[in-house]
Image: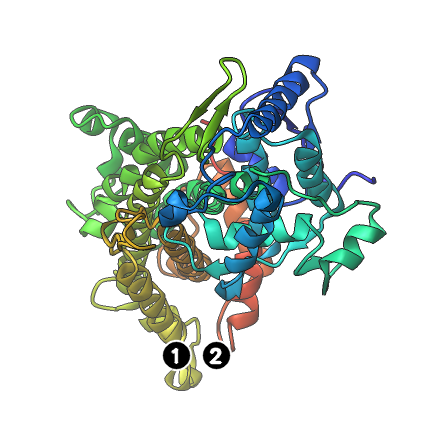
Amino acid sequence: MTPPPNESPSPRFGDAPLRIEDVVALSRRRAVAELSEDPAFRARITRGADFLDRLLKEDGVIYGVTTGYGDSCTVNIPPELVAELPHHLFAYHGCGLGRFLDEAETRAVLAARLASLARGMSGVSLPLLEGLVLLLKHDVLPLIPAEGSVGASGDLTPLSYVAAVLCGEREVMYQGQRRAAKEVLAEIGMVPLQLRPKEGLAIMNGTAVMTALACLAFHRAEYLCRLATRLTAFNVLASAGNAHHFDAVLFAAKPHPGQSRVAQRLREDLHSDRPPRNEQRLQDRYSLRCAPHVIGVLEDALPFLRQLIETELNSANDNPLIDPDREQILHGGHFYGGHIAFAMDSMKNAVANIADLLDRQLALLVDTRFNHGLPSNLSAASGPRAAINHGLKALQISVSAWTAEALKLTMPASVFSRSTECHNQDKVSMGTISARDCLRIVELTEQVVAAMLIAARQGIELRQRVAGPQSELRDEPAAMYDDLRQRIPLIEEDRALDVELRGLLDDIRSERWALYAD
């Protein structure tokens, strides 16, 4: 196979724990999935599958293998029907609705499920792991409906579409076309799997969907955190604000590490080691003065959220688990996605607050009562034509709409547990719903940021018209501003901005600008 462009070092499943960055690289086709060749790893996988086979021959009772599922665990399966049970599991769970996960999300789901099964405690065979690797390598992507999971007993319904595709059923996206899985598997030379007795349950009974979405949300939120800091620096400059609100001694008095890093970045961006100018206001409004305190919440939360997400990513999270060394069946509840639910509910709150912060900054910039000498709505029109031009008036309304929608979605999903499946699943995590909400909030905040990039480009140049040329940005932010200036024409005559906004969204999601080396 030809390696994808911008290839990253390929993660080898089974060799070492996966990082969020590995999942992101696989989701963007910047890395190729590989399965460990380590003999000890492969022997461990084989031991688990062989132990299950031996137990079946000895008439052992195994949940989900010789019994029904969930509340049906008291139903014993006749030995001659055990082999058919995995097919029934993914068949009756084929009831997902809503949008399909996009290509990046689907690749991340495959990677997250593979990472869990490669722990060697799920009783699956090597061909199953190799099948997941092949789907990733050839970019054969199951069409996975986003809705239908309560996050315990894992992501059963969405993951049933992965199980079905491995068996040559349902549909995939392949080379930009929606096609029957059976046809595509034949084209790539993959024989559809005949799932072994526990393999359907092992694929489906886990947290792969919520964890995959959490990895993508984390990566995008981390970049937004830095972009919001850079935009605040731009907006302080455009507002003729006081950069000394970010003084090092001031932040040493309240030393939250992330908050202090944000303040340091702002100091560096704004040359704020210079003595204050006499004409500077004593105190700016909160959306500027307290920006490190708002952005710093996300900055401080990210390491903790990473630990929650990566621990889940590298866990065996189905049920029952198989200990191949002690030859034991361990019945538990590792499919429960509470840690991911908490991480996503927390992250969406912190990210939405950043959207709200930037929305307030824009409200100051466009209002002549608060922007300290800039034209209304940051319009660059002059002379008689100024009367018919409206600058960023509508853009500010759109930013307000995107922010309001983001704030509306911050209601924690994890507190809305529902008792399901005849009260067997009587306390569930709602982690997948929370992860989807979080990604939507990230998307809306990226839209706010795209608008703020236009406002920064406009506001700084208009400030220079009022105050004369200034050199208050250091090299890196100055280069970023120059890039924006070259690519976004000054808005002197009203024009539609949607094409530019979509281009800026692409820039944000591809991380066009390197932001802070710390």
User: Quarter holding the C terminus?
Assistant: top left
User: Quarter holding the N terminus?
Assistant: top right
Observer able to see residue 371: yes
Q: CA distance from mark 2 to mark 1?
A: 7 Å
Q: Is residue 84 left or right of residue 116?
A: right
**Toward which corner of the image does residue 364 lie, by quadrant?**
bottom left
Tell me the crowding category of disc 2: few under 14, some 14 to 19, or many 20 or more residues within 10 angstroms, Cα based: some
Q: Hey, what amino acid is under mark 2? A: Asp
- 139 vs 2: above or below: below
Q: What residue is rendered at 26% in x and 59% in y?
A: 360
In the picture of the structure, the residue carrying the numbered disc 2 is 494
- The one of 494 and 259 positioned closer to us in this rendering: 259
Percent of width and height locating residue 398: 37, 71
In the picture of the structure, the residue carrying the numbered disc 1 is 390
- 214 vs 493: above or below: above
Judged from the image, the secondary structure of the residue bearing numbered disc 2 is: loop
* Cβ atoms at labels 2 and 1 below 8 Å apart: yes
- 496 vs 8: above or below: below
**Toward which corner of the image does residue 136 lie, by quadrant?**
top right
